[in-house]
Each structure stands twice: as C-alpha cells, then as structure tokens.
Amino acid sequence: MTEPDEVSRIEGSLRDSLGDQVRVIADPYSGVRVTAISAEFTGMTPRRRRERVQSAVPEADIVRYELLTPEEASFIEAEEVSASPVQAELPLWPEALANGNADEITVRFPSDDYGTLPSPVVSTFYSLRGGVGRSTALAHAARSIAEQGLTVLCIDMDLEAPGLASLFDVEECVTEGMGVVSLLAGAEVTGEISSLDAHVLRVTEDTGLFLLPAGRPGAEYARLLGHLDPTAWYGEDDVNPLRLLVEAVSKLPERPDVVLIDSRTGISPLAAPLLFDVSDINIIAFYPHPQAQAGTRALTRALLAAKSRRSTDGSPYTPEVRFVVSPVPATPEVRELYAERSQEWIREWLSVARSDSGGPAFEALEEIVQVIGYQETLAASDSVMRVQGADDFIVVANWITGLVEPRDVLGEREDTLSEPSKADVLGSLHFAGETAENQEWDELHNTFLSTADVDRALDLETVVVIGRKGTGKTAVFRKLSESPQAIVVTSPPGLDTHKSWTPDADVYAALESELRGRGLEWRQVWPALVGLAIHQHLPQAPQPHWVEMPIGGAVGGGGYLKTDLLKDVRALISPPQAPLLVGEWIHEIDRSLSENHVLLFDALDTGFGNTDSERKRRNEGVAGLLTTVGAIGPQLRRLKFKVLLREDIWREVGVPNKSHLSARSARLSWSNKTDYLRIAIKQAWRSPAFKQMVTARLNKPGFRLEDTPIEYWPEEFVRNAWVILASERVSGGRTAYTDNWVWSRLADANGDHAPRALAQMMTVAVDLERGFEEGNRYSRSIIRPRALVESLDQVSSSALDALQRDEFPELDPLLTRLRAIGSTPFPADQLEGASPDLIRLARDVGLLEAVSGPRDKTERYRVPEMYRKALSMTRKGQA
C-alpha cells in the first residue's frame, strides 16, 4: 500500500493542476485511486482525461480513475469528493490484476482450518492459453467425482467456443434455445433465471453426472451472445445474471454436490467473475513454456487477492487455487524436469501469500500441483466417455471433493437414543501405540490382526520372517511363543521368553572369541545353542554322548545362567569332530520327539549390540545361523526353524543358496491399505461404545459385524467403520480422503507401513480430539481430521527416535547432514562426502528415496513425511 505522505503529495500536485475537487486514496494493495471533477475534462475522451491526470503526476502509480466534468457529476448525482470514494472490490480483470500487485497478500483458505463448504462447491477450470487440456481435465475430474457417489453439474461457460457437450458425447441432445447463453440473456432482460430443468442434460444413467451446455451455436446463439455484458452485471444494477444462475443451480431437484465450470481462455470478460466471484476453488491449467509464465503469474497473484462468496464469522475466504501442468512429454525424466520447472514458477507466484499468522501460506506445492503427461489415448479420443484409466485426474477430483461438506456421520437419527454418545466413545478408546514387547498378553491378543502376510509368517513351513521395526515381527514372535511346542532360542529382553541364559551381546562376543580360538565358524556353533535351548524346554531330550558331564544344568544348583550356557557350548564344540557330533545330536533329538516344535529366533538385530564391531559380529553370526537353517532344517522332521529378521540385515548378509530360504520366507510389509485400516478398527473395537455405535449403523440383514472377525469384514465395512472413527476427508490437499492421507503420511521411503505408527497416530489423535471437543464440538466423526493432521509431528518424532536410537545409531552423521540441508527433495550433490554405506543404509531402511534422472543417475533425494517433520526439514515446494 502506498504511504500516506506519498498520497498527500500526489493529491496536492493534482489540486494545483486541476482544482480543489480532487481526492486521492491509497489502493488496498498497491498504487492509488484518483477521483476528480474538473471543467478541464469537458470534451475529452476518457483516455485523454487519464493522460491529463497522469501528465500532472507522471511518477504516480494510478490503478483506478473516476474523472468527471461538473455537469457529469451533477447528472449522476455524484457524492462530494471530500468524502472518500467507495473502494469497490469488483471481480473484473482491471481491479483483480491491480489487487494482485502487492508485495504481501494475506489469504484465508477454507482448507486452512480443515474446513469444508456447504454444497454445491463451485470450481472453475481456467487457462490463459488454449491447448493445455483444461476441458479434458474438467471432464475426467467430473467422471471421477461422480464415480465417488457425488452429484456433479458441469457448466460450459466457454461461450465463444463451447465443447463440453461433445466431450461428454451428448452434443446431439443440445437443442435450440437451450443452455447458458439463453439463460443469461433472459436474465439480463427479466432479472430472473428461468427454470433450469429443460436446460440440464444427464450425461450418465448410473452416476450423478449432469451438464448445463453453453447452447447450440447458430444465428440466434450468436445474437444473444453479443448482448451479454458481464462487466455491466457488476454496476449499480442489482441484477447479476451470473449470480442468479449459480443460485438457481442450488435449487435443482437433484442438488449438485459439486459444480464444475469450464471458462473461456484469456482475459475474456466472463472469465473474471467466474474466477474472482463465484468460484470456491480455481483449477489453473498451463504448459510450462516461457510464453505462459508472466500471464499466469499475474493471474495467480490476482486470485490470491480475491475474496470468495463464502465466509465464516463475517470474514470472507480466499478461493482455493490448484494447478494442472499439461500436457508434458511422457518420458519420466522429461516429466520430472517440467514438474520441477513448474514448481519453481508456482513457488515464486505464491511467495507473496501469507497466512493470518504472517507465515508462508502454502506448505507443500506438490500437493497443489498435478503434472499430466501426454497420453495418446486422451489426445486421440473424441469423448471422455470412451476413455478408461485416466488416473492422473483423480488427484484433480480429490482437490475439489476435499472441500465438500461430508455427511454428518454422528448426526441425529431416529434410533440414536439407543446409541452411545461421542463422549462415551471418545472416553473409552485406547490404541496400543507401545511396542509389542511392552504390551500385556491380553492387549496383544485383542489387537493382533491376522492378514495373509501374518498368516504366512505364523505358518510352521515359513522359515524366515522379514520386516522392518514396527511391522509386527515381535508380535508374531510372541504369538508363536505362546504355544507349548515353542522353543525360544533367542528373545528380546523384557519378555518372559527372555531367560537368565538367553544369549546377549556379551555371550555373542565370548562365543566369537571361542570360535576364533578353535578355528570354527558361526554355522558350527548355532546347532550347539539350539540343542542347549531345547534342553531348557525339554529336559528329557537325549544328552550328547561325547561330553563327560550332562549339559543343561546349573553349576551352582540354581537357575541356568549365561555362564552355564558358555560352559556347555565349550564342552560341545571341544572335540575335533564337534560340528559333525553336534549335528548328529540335533537329529537324534528330532527323532525322539512325538510332535512338532518350533525353534524361535528373535532380537538378532540389537541383541548383538550397536557398535561397529558388534554389527560386524551380528552380520557374521546371522549369516551362520541362516546357513545352519538352510543346511539342516530340511532334514529335520519335528523341529521347525523360525527366524525373525530385520529386513536390512536379511539383504546385507550373504548366505549360500539364499534363494531357497527366500522361497520359504514371509515379509511383513503391510502393502494393503484396507488391512492397514483394520489395525485401527480392531483396536478401537475393544471399546464397547464404539462397537455399539458401529454395529447400530453398519449392520445389515444377514451380516452382523459383531459375529464376524474384523479380519474377514468386506472392504466396504472396513472403510465405513473408518469414516465413523476418523472422518472421510481432509480438506484441500492432494489426498482428500483421510484413509489416503494416513496411508501416504505413514509410509517410509520404500512405501512400507508400520502398524505401530498407525496405533501411535490414533493414540495422539484421540488425546487431541478430547481437548478440541471441550471448546468446539464436532459431530462428523469420533476423531476430526485436524487431530490426525496435528498428531503427525509426534508420530514423526517417535519414528525417527526409534530409527536412530533403537535400530541404527550409526545414522547419526547422516541425520545431522539432513537437518543442515533443511528441505526435501534436495540435489544429490548435497550429500557429497557422506559415507556411501550410510546413504545405502538410509535408502534400505526407508529414510531416503533416490530420484533418478537420465541414464538412471541419482539426481535428488527425498525424505518421507514419516521422518521429514522430526528432522525439521521443510518441503522444497513451500512457497
């Protein structure tokens, strides 16, 4: 805004030149507005008057003029110029573009408050230039939204070149006198919009997709179009045909949830009101060519300064803005190049936007930008109704549906008297966010979820169970260890399966020294450890015949200790033929058994210790164990090996015939989103109030949820229960649905998901929701989306802490480097000098994702949301 002293100086200069009837005020965004009444203007054209004023103050940035002769002022009953001229915020191009010239613009989007809007949500699709797929994006987004079960009305406002009817394959249904042009022209005359029923076409019978066409081009269409004057709609006359049309849309018998408007390209008169007046969210399509840069920049700044028809507490919202970059070359490296260029542009365009608190208004550009690669099937198709698989446009659809007010899941129903209240449910929810080692047995039983991967891990024929920390390996271990037939060889500390003799880092160090002294390898000591563990579980098992004293007993007559274990190992491996003898002993034990027993190995990661030398010992020890399992396991009839192993260790160790073990392995990765949601539902199901609420709302004749294990619920019931628990949508972002949001935020760089992270998120979110509910009741779900979003900081800190402290302390130098880099993604050369082994480890464990360029060379790295927040890294996309 222009400084007051400068305004006074300009006004003084104009009074000296034109007389006293001059008033100058600062424009709210930039420059000044001038009102003047002077006889000098007599006989001058408007352009000449503006030139006269500008010549008097050539350095002034005048953005609005009201220049009248005394006769004109008297005729239109102008107010005295001593009063401040009205600062009308007209949604027209001159005003909008001038308003966007500010150095800083405070914006307030509905999505800032995780807010939604009453239907219909209006979205305008616009492009400054043609040929960028604007109408195609609208049509495919409309199909996607309709397929989500919402009602969509598309309005063709590209009046000079209508095309939506053709894209939707209903052009032949558009008759003379139908459409937008006829409706707007009639409203200019009568001040009313006639009934829309005869003008709206149903595009599909099986979904709620409708079209209000522009009209049928012809002589009458051209005549009516020529009469339309959008600029005049925003004069003093109360009749505004465009606003009347939007109002009429809301009164249709099938009230749309979403209205999608296809706008004319360029600085056309009707485009401005669509963008700056009636729209809730604007989708701006452009191709990242320098020709589009300056114009789209000015448009974006103008959109940031606009005020929508929506408001809360009398404070108007800013229309949301999203970008479609289209159609870029389809090759991955070129597409990535264009994506980066477009984000650099958009970052600069949005850099003036500030939130109410004064900080940057946009957190992550990748969530508001969608890059669409060239697709021949789309380019060659005459109609979007004949094209399948246009998945890129689902993101665009989700931007819009994210603002649609969801159904009131917990609202009033006829039978709610028999249901618990939200307070009852919220007060009884508890999620098992602690580690499996720390869970009570009852809690583990009630939260343990069987999936295809878990069932395979439990199968006795599965030898190796692989997964990163938090994916449920220890939960599987505890489930298996419950069986009377379980024989625990190694165990995490803190469990009742961890005995006074269970090997730990000191035992492994002593064993390594013993092996070196005797010239033996780890594969030759593991059978001895297995035999000794069997004797602690099955004392009646055969004794080794070559040792002088019986093994398995305590020297002091008390409990069997680690020192006893080491003494017995030395006795077992001391003869020259010890490896053969121990192997034969294990076979003898196997033949003596009358039922199957499972040999369990867990805690093989931190159980060896975390120093460099201990990790080296671990890799050698685990390789020896797997070699033993692969060599003698297939020969045993009753003894079944089950090794639970961290994924990075499995990849790192070298084992002969590893492929044979791979064929008998199970990986706990949680790659199915529905199964992942089941984790939260099963844990919430322990609340009687939640169970009562869900069954009352979701039970159907012939299918009672309480009679069916959650593992076997159909996907529809899992998602509906999730919506009751955690709402349907997070407004405004790329992943509008809460299940998608959680799924993407809790993934590591390899796309893996940990059940523990979800349980932790739900634990924190419940605590937050209890606080939110005290001051602002929310009836659309038990947990509001805001609580989920704000829980991510704490979940991220816990995940990084577990990664750094419990699993990989060796990553400390790399984590320090990432904190210094400060944003993601970042160029690969910013890790120059870092240990290649650490970078490889970071990629293996899901801390870093490599982004390749031409010739598969790594150009950038990304840090996933799981860890980004805890590292205090901003997204590079922040504006």
Image (cartoon, rainbow, N blue to C red):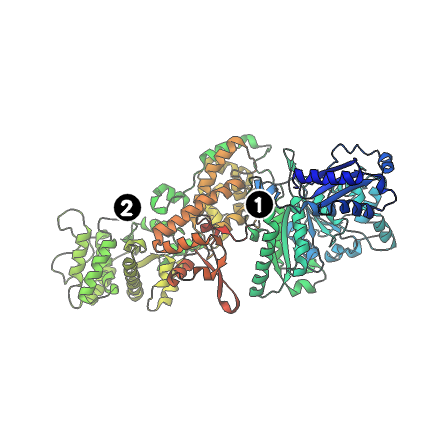
Q: Residue 673 appears at what percent x and percent y?
A: 50, 51
Q: Which residue is drawn at the image coordinates 53% and 33% (left, top)? A: 419
Crowdedness of circle 1 by 10 Å Cα count: few (<14), some, many (20+)?
A: many
Sequence-wise, which precedes: disc 1 or disc 2? Answer: 1
Residue type at mark 1 is: Ala
**Left or right of residue 22, residue 668 in this image:** left
Residue 512 is labelled as: none
Furthest-front residue in this view? 16
In this rendering, is residue 16 above or below 383?
above
Check the picture and name the quadrant holding the N terminus. Answer: top right
x and y percentages locating residue 17 in the rendered image = 78, 41
When the figure is inspected, residue 335 is found, relative to residue 34, above or below; the finding is below
Say which mark, if any, is on residue 361. 1
Secondary structure of the residue carrying tag 2 is: loop
- Figure disc tally: 2
Closer to us: 528 or 368: 368
Mark nearest the camera among 1 and 2 is: 1
Q: Is residue 245 visible?
A: no
Q: Is residue 318 visible?
A: yes
Between 568 and 361, the one nearer to me in the picture:
361
Find the distance from the CA under tag 1 to the CA under tag 2.
52 Å
Q: Name which residue type carries label 2.
A: Asp
Looking at this view, is 666 or 366 the one in front?
366
Residue beneath disc 2:
496
